[in-house]
Image (cartoon, helix red, strand yellow):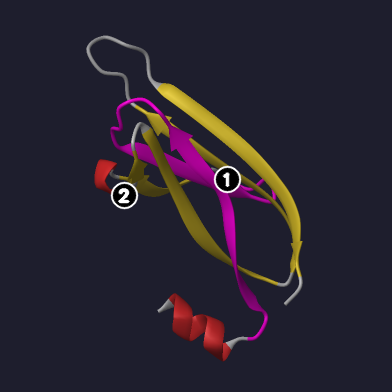
Amino acid sequence: MARRLHESCSRVCATTIGTLTTTGSVDSVDATISVLNGPVVQAFTIEPQDFEHSGRDKSFSKTFFFVNGSYAFEVCGTQSGAQGRTSKGVCATYVFTVAC
């Protein structure tokens, strides 16, 4: 579907926004996004099998599609705590311009 959209509209570009990495055990991660300081929305869930494994290192990358323009894009990941531990979370903001 996204590929068809990309082919039919030359102003849509694919952009990979950062990579989530960990050396700990992996559990599912709930990801939220906010574009241009808009509302925060639940975007997707990263399941343990979605991570690429290389020894202790685990990583996950996600591709997003944008039309031409300038963006402030924030993506956050939250992993629930286990065995009484607190939840962990991280956010990153990316400011960029798409011109394709």
Q: Which mark is residue 39?
A: 1
| In this picture, residue 91 sits left or right of residue 70 | left
Q: Is residue 50 magenta?
A: no
In the rendering, at what x and y percent does residue 51 appear?
34, 45
Residue closer to the observer: 61 or 66? 61
Residue closer to the observer: 41 or 61? 61
At 46% across and 85% down in the image, what residue appears? 4
- Tag in front: 2 or 1: 2
Query: As shown in the figure, which amino acid type bears the numbered disc 2?
Result: Asp
Q: Secondary structure at mark 1?
A: loop
Question: In the rendered image, which quarter contains the N terminus?
Answer: bottom left
In the rendering, at what x and y percent does residue 28 appear?
30, 37
Q: Secondary structure at mark 2?
A: helix
Q: Residue furthest bottom?
A: 8
Q: Main secondary structure of the magenta part?
A: strand
Query: As shown in the figure, which amino acid type bears the numbered disc 1?
Result: Pro
In the rendering, at what x and y percent does residue 50 appear?
31, 49
Question: In the rendered image, which quarter contains the C terminus?
Answer: bottom right
Q: Which residues are magenta?
A: 10-38
At 28% across and 33% down in the image, what residue appears? 27
The answer to whether 17 is drawn above or below residue 48 in the figure is below
Q: Between disc 2 and disc 1, whose residue precedes?
A: 1
In the picture of the structure, the residue carrying the numbered disc 2 is 50
| In this picture, residue 6 sits left or right of residue 26 | right
* Real-space Cα separation, disc 2 to disc 1, in angstroms: 26 Å
At 69% across and 46% down in the image, what residue appears? 94
| In this picture, residue 51 sits left or right of residue 35 | left
